Image (cartoon, rainbow, N blue to C red):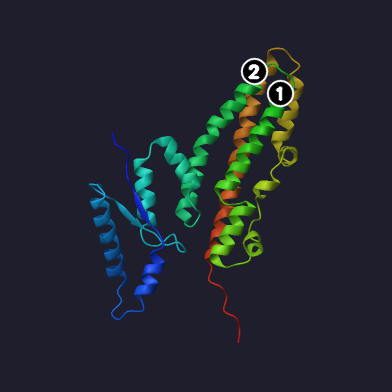
């Protein structure tokens, strides 16, 4: 089977702005002409059935972005689809929801990994590994939702707002850079999961029973903390998106 071909024509804003200077400007007609020109050139180059997507550099949600997103989601295999969804820019509430769904689907697998490690008869190993697992995945959630300095700075530049204004609505989640071993241990100490982990550490020294109970405690702890963190990160990401898309308040005269 041959590779699928997608042609993305970006910067259509520049073409539209140039055409606006002409009389009888029509945006739909201009976009149609750009698309037709792309298709004709691709056919001349040997592409039998070219698929062209017109995108804006500054307003990604406009034009063919939604169609491109849906096309790729439908035609990529499961692994590539998962990676693609997580890599999409957070410019639509629907994208945030899809990211949350994809990340949520993986929580069970991560918890099972934690359970398997927790069942090993090595005192203290489970806690060390659980903390490492939580750090990696919580950081991943923040990056996927754009709750990191680089993503927030880029978004602030795109919407022409101070990055501090976007950060001001992030209430429940830390930024990715703040997620450390100490942060996770602090979360554990403030929840019932912390007491369970202490119990697991004690039971690690009881042959047989420690492995049996330890696996279950690791599973429950990892699943609970990741689900709660995911919910809160998704909620904060939605607030950031809302703030970013809010029109600037008009300055009083």
Q: Secondary structure at mark 2?
A: helix
Residue 231 visible in image: no
Q: Is residue 74 above or below residue 167?
A: above
Q: Residue furthest front?
A: 45
* Quadrant that contains the C terminus: bottom right
Q: Which mark is residue 125?
A: 1
* Quadrant that contains the N terminus: top left
Q: Residue furthest bottom?
A: 253
Q: Is residue 183 left or right of residue 30?
A: right
Please give the residue where the numbered disc 2 appears in the rendered image: 212
Neighbours of disc 2 within 10 Å: few (<14), some (14-19), many (20+): some
Q: Is residue 219 left or right of residue 245?
A: right
User: Percent x, y for residue 71?
Assistant: 34, 48
User: Percent x, y for residue 52?
Assistant: 31, 54
Q: Is residue 135 above or below residue 7?
A: above
Residue 92 visible in image: yes
Q: Is residue 63 above or below residue 253?
A: above
Q: Is residue 3 left or right of residue 40?
A: right
């Amino acid at each position: 089977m041959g590779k699928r071909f997608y042609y993305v024509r970006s910067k259509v804003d520049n073409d539209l702005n140039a055409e606006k200077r002409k009389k009888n400007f029509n945006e739909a007609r201009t976009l149609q002409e750009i698309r037709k020109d792309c298709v004709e050139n691709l056919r001349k180059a040997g592409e039998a059935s070219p698929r062209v997507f017109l995108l804006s550099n500054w307003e990604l949600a406009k034009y063919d972005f939604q169609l491109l997103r849906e096309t790729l989601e439908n035609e990529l295999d499961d692994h590539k689809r998962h990676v693609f969804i997580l890599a999409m820019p957070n410019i639509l509430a629907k994208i945030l929801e899809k990211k949350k769904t994809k990340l949520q689907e993986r929580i069970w697998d991560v918890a099972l990994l934690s359970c398997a490690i927790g069942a090993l008869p090595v005192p203290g190993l489970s806690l060390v590994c659980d903390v490492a697992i939580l750090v990696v995945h919580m950081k991943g959630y923040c990056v996927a939702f754009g709750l990191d300095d680089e993503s927030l700075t880029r978004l602030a530049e795109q919407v022409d707002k101070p990055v501090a204004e976007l950060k001001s609505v992030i209430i429940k989640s830390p930024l990715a850079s703040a997620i450390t071993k100490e942060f996770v241990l602090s979360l554990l100490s403030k929840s019932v999961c912390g007491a369970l982990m202490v119990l697991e550490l004690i039971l690690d020294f009881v042959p047989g029973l420690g492995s049996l109970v330890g696996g279950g405690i690791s599973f429950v702890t990892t699943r609970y903390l990741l689900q709660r963190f995911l919910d809160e990160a998704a909620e904060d990401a939605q607030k950031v998106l809302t703030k970013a898309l809010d029109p600037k308040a008009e300055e009083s005269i």
